Amino acid sequence: MSAQDAAAARLREFTGREPDAVWSAPGRANLIGEHTDYNEGFVLPFAIEHRTAAAVALRDDDVIRVTSTFAPDAVGVSLAELDETIARGDLDWAAYPLGVAWALRRAAPGAAARGVDIAIASDVPVGAGLSSSAAIEGAVASALNDEWDAGLSPVSLARVGRTAENDAVGAPTGIMDQMASMLGVADAATFLDCRTLETDSVDLGLRREGLSLLVIDTNVKHSHATGGYRERRASCEAGAAAMGVPSLRDLSVGDLPRAQELLDDVTFRRVRHIVTENQRVLDTVWTLRSAGPRAIGDLLVASHVSMRDDFEISGPELDLAVDTALAAGAIGARMTGGGFGGAAIALLDDGQVADAGAAVTAAFAASGFAAPTIFTVRPSEGARRDR
Ligand code: GLA
């Protein structure tokens, strides 16, 4: 069953009513540009065909209730109590949809906010580095934008999603995932300048070239609300402050020798990853446009090496996935997303997909790692109202 059908069925079961409509938003994979978003740099993600759907029906009162196929116990709160409920911070997964409602009301104070029942279903794998959270945010933000006549643009809805993530869920992420989920275009990646939020779609040409993108989910779960992600962000901010710039976006490769003199070794390597990664995103966009997808392999691999050695957010499973995919003939491969687990992507010929997948599965078994989940993804359309 599609996520849209499952969400509508859950709403019927929960309320006995038909949804007013069903909205959905995709997860994303990131082709290149990791941890650059909160440094106001460049990223090149694409929306995937796995989607999260929200079936929604307006109510006659001011109560918002959310339920889902994965956590059927409904959480309800009146709009009047939304601020306190969010501030209490004890909502578990409901912090995503309720956080979006809260953030959207702040972004559009004139909106005709009223009670709604929201039922969510998703086929985006959770904790795999494919932005299941941005998919929930995008679906709910799109739904409430329409139901409440808020009139916000897709970019404003992406900001709403990030506010929910940062302030209601408590994960100090950037805006890449929400922008990719809101603005995705079929067969293309979204080149995003995270300082200006300007986007440009970049044709990937995968079909034309007979290429596939393989996702290797290591099934090592991560959370960005705690631990390593937050620490990396703090190091980047400390590095920028020590270099006297507002953010690491303002440094280029030519500044690295001075950074090495000024910074301690760990901070320097964190900074070097961000500065070189920004350059790699620009180089990838240029290469895709001038030479096509077969020419970007070295950039993908260099990005992985930088995350492994300088930013230190990879891990044995991710490294093995990348190394094995490359040994099996992939053009390029890298971990994707926030790191500390999650997924790697590999770019390879259509005809190599089965063998590369089998090689990675065998390598994981030989190393005693839990079996990975392997599937291909197609760059797909962003958030929309489905019906
Ligand atoms: C997570 C965050 C994003 C981004 C990536 C790393 O997916 O949600 O904002 O920082 O990690 O590139």
Image: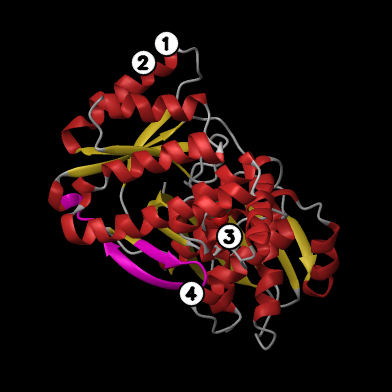
Q: Mark 3 or 2, which is nearer the eye?
A: 3
Label drawn at residue 38: 3
User: Hey, what amino acid is under mark 1?
Assistant: Ala
Label 3 to label 1: alpha-carbon separation: 37 Å
Q: Is residue 184 magenta?
A: no
Q: Nearer the viewer, mark 3 or mark 1?
A: 3
Q: Nearer the viewer, mark 4 or mark 1?
A: 1
Three-letter code for the amino acid on which mark 2 is drawn: Ala
Instruction: Please name the amino acid that badge 4 sits on.
Output: Pro
- Residue 362's disc number: 2
Q: Which mark is residue 154?
A: 4
Label 4 sits on a secondary structure element that is helix
Tell me residue 201's x, y (percent): 32, 67
Which comes sooner in the sequence, label 2 or label 4?
4
The residue pinned by badge 1 equals 366
Magenta span: 190-207
